[in-house]
Amino acid sequence: MVERRNLETGLLEIQIPAVVAEIRQEVLKLKNHKETPYRLGTTKIRYPDGGEGEVLTRFYSKSIEAHPDVFRAGERISIIIQAEGDYAGRAVASLPGSSVDLARLIGKNLEKPSILEPSSESKLKDHLVDEEAVV
């Protein structure tokens, strides 16, 4: 389990492993300016007390298209659950594994995405493989 603050919303999120139970075929759209397409489905999780449960989960259409071998029934993924705010308890599908805390890894806070290049004082240089950053 990974807990982190969403940099865009400021809300606490929890990322946990899950198994895809089903992804429905109907494509819905978020009520945002992009009208982001998604599908609903369910994932199976294990609670800390050992019990299991199914969770209604949002699967973004672009993620399904980009990774059809991952986002299908029976596959292990991660889900990100909003832990506070109006949508607390809601889950969104994510690729398996956890995200890297970049501020902790490279020792600086990144507000906007940027290309990281190792410098003589960068902590990133310790994590190079064949002169390419593994991120």
Image (cartoon, helix red, strand yellow):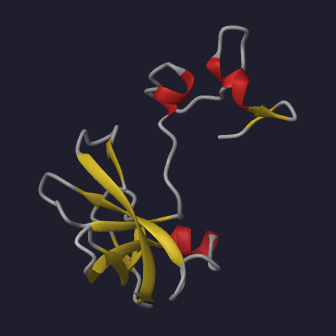
Relative to 25, is 65 above or below? above
Viewer-proximal residue, 10 or 26? 10
Residue 36 spot, x, y in % from top left: 41, 65
Lateral position of residue 55 relative to residue 135, left or right:
left
Relative to 82, is 105 above or below? above
- On the image, which quarter does residue 70 sit in? bottom right
- On the image, which quarter does residue 48 sit in? bottom left
Seen at 72% across and 22% down, the residue is 125
Residue 102 spot, x, y in % from top left: 51, 32
Lateral position of residue 96 relative to residue 85, left or right:
right
Viewer-proximal residue, 48 or 58? 48
Seen at 47% across and 27% down, the residue is 103
Seen at 42% across and 73% down, the residue is 18
Viewer-proximal residue, 129 or 33? 129
- On the image, which quarter does residue 34 sit in? bottom left
Residue 111 spot, x, y in % from top left: 43, 27
Q: Residue furthest top?
A: 121
Seen at 44% across and 91% down, the residue is 25
